[in-house]
Amino acid sequence: MPASQSASEKPTALIALADGSLFYGKGFGRPGETVAELVFNTSMTGYQEIMTDPSYAGQVVTFTFPHIGNTGVNPEDDETNDPVAAGMVVKWDPTEPSNWRAAETLVEWLEKRGRIGIGGIDTRRLTRAIRQQGAPHVALAYNPDGVFDIEALVRKAREWSGLEGLDLAKDVTCSQSYRWDEMRWAWPEGYKKAEGNDLKVVAIDYGAKRNILRCLASAGCDVTVLPATATTEDVLALEPDGVFLSNGPGDPAATGEYAVPMIKGILETELPVFGICLGHQMLALALGAKTIKMNHGHHGANHPVKDLTTGKVEITSMNHGFAVDSQTLPKGVSETHVSLFDGSNCGIAISDRPVFSVQYHPEASPGPQDSYYLFERFATAMRARKA
Ligand SMILES: NC(=O)CC[C@H](N)C(=O)O
């Protein structure tokens, strides 16, 4: 029985792991059932941004920080229209929000937007299980009557084929192109807003977070967003000064089937290219490298990364379960950033061209702002080429 639940309280939600272990708790949000990969996120803030980050499609998120829900939710902090993560796992029942920006409670929001939450879980024990097993496949069920077919849930978790080989970008991308001109609201210390937006950027939406588009606009970009399946010709027809490859869910190797040929075409031009997370992984694939599935991935807002070109360490926000295998980087492509947690690849660049990408999220808000310089680097490269 979880710590926050009294012995008389009947569990209304359940997480069934593929190995048969069960975690009972109290359901909130929309009753139902979902099968997904279970990951943990260590961020102390930003649960709304995490739940609406399209990169979390196909994943249920366990929050290791216990006070989730205490600032409510508001319309401005959505990274896309609706929550995309399949569900959320928290230690305590969400409390009433106490924040001037709160427009509704987390519970109401999840209920309206059709996502399952489970509270009263021993998230330390669950996090240890995730670390030991590697992100497990789970079935998460919420039934206010407290009735569950446990065998069926475990079977569903076991039979789910998982994220490897799964292309989810096509499910979360935009259906048609659009322009973006909104800038960031909060400004990273030491940076100035660009004057004007003279740089034409095509951003490919594999599941783009809104704050990335705001950062591009703030660095002086006039952004046109194209759906994930855009071809090289679609991109070049817009005569951009640079191409941006967004973050997104699923396996880069699967998504790369349409993205990699498009990126290869762009690499034949001299255009500056900047990629984030899934965009980073797909740029690496297009250059001939390989990606691998990590044990439990990196999800949090305090991941130290070393910039190998300057020796400087950045504290970064991360959310990925796959990584670029730096051993497979071809000649002429260098590893520019590494994780100081496990040495995994966190950035690459073509040696003599403004083509670069990072595994982490330099736009993350809330979260550390150390990496905003990458947007300015992209803008500077486009300006240099224009001149
Ligand atoms: N944030 C992202 O873009 C995630 C990329 C990819 N889906 C991964 O899990 O590694």
Image: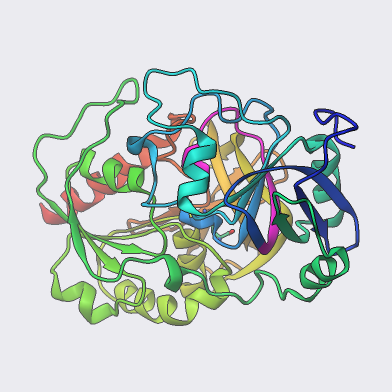
Extreme residue in the front direction: 145
Q: How is the image coloured?
A: rainbow
Q: Nearer the viewer, residue 222 or 375?
A: 222
Residue 385 occupies quadrant: bottom left
Percent position of residue 261, x then y: 40, 81
**Quadrant that contains the N terminus:** top right
Q: Residue at x 19, y 74 (%)?
A: 236
Q: Which residues are magenta?
A: 34-51
Q: Residue at x 34, y 25 (%)?
A: 188
**Left-right relation of 11 to 330:** right
Residue 44 occupies quadrant: top right
Q: Vertically, is 267 above or below 135? A: below
> Whereabouts is ligand 1, in terms of quadrant?
bottom right
Percent position of residue 222, x then y: 15, 51
Is 47 inside the magenta-drawn segment? yes
Is residue 33 visible to the viewer in this orientation of the structure?
yes
Percent position of residue 110, x then y: 52, 45
